[in-house]
Image (tube, rainbow, N blue to C red):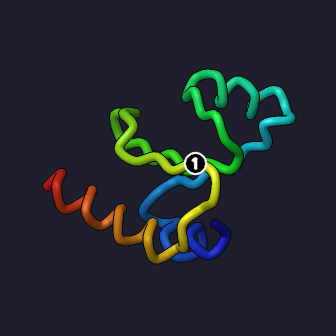
Amino acid sequence: MHGLARELGERLRIIELNVNEAIGARARAVYSNDKVAAIILLNAAGSEVYRTEGKLPRTGQVREKLAKIEASSQ
């Protein structure tokens, strides 16, 4: 995720949360994710557009998904 943050940090906001801390536990409850780790992409309106839980995909896979989401919103 750090590489993704460096690469795309100007285009999106990446927030890493620890589910063992209060804010991370609240986010886990709000987004109902069952597994750690999780990537949840939200659009500008706050609607979920992508989710993966458990074993995280490679950065390239997340980048590809993000490109498809951006293309479909234009």
**Could you say which quadrant of the image residue 62 lies in?**
bottom left
Residue at 53% in and 73% down:
59
Residue at 82% in and 26% down:
22
Tell me the crowding category of disc 1: few under 14, some 14 to 19, or many 20 or more residues within 10 angstroms, Cα based: some
Q: Considering the image in quadrants, where does the N terminus appear?
A: bottom right
Residue at 71% in and 45% down:
36
Q: Position of residue 7 (x, y in %)?
A: 52, 76
Q: Position of residue 44 (x, y in %)?
A: 35, 41
Amino acid type for the residue under numbered disc 1: Glu
Query: Which type of secondary structure does the marked residue at label 1 adopt?
Result: strand
* 31 lies above or below 36: above
* Left/right of residue 52 with respect to residue 71 in the rendered view: right
* Left/right of residue 71 with respect to residue 42 in the rendered view: left
Residue at 56% in and 51% down:
39
* Left/right of residue 68 with respect to residue 29 in the rendered view: left
Q: Considering the image in quadrants, where does the C terminus appear?
A: bottom left
Question: Badge 1 is on which residue?
Answer: 53
* 48 lies above or below 57: above
**Could you say which quadrant of the image residue 71 lies in?**
bottom left
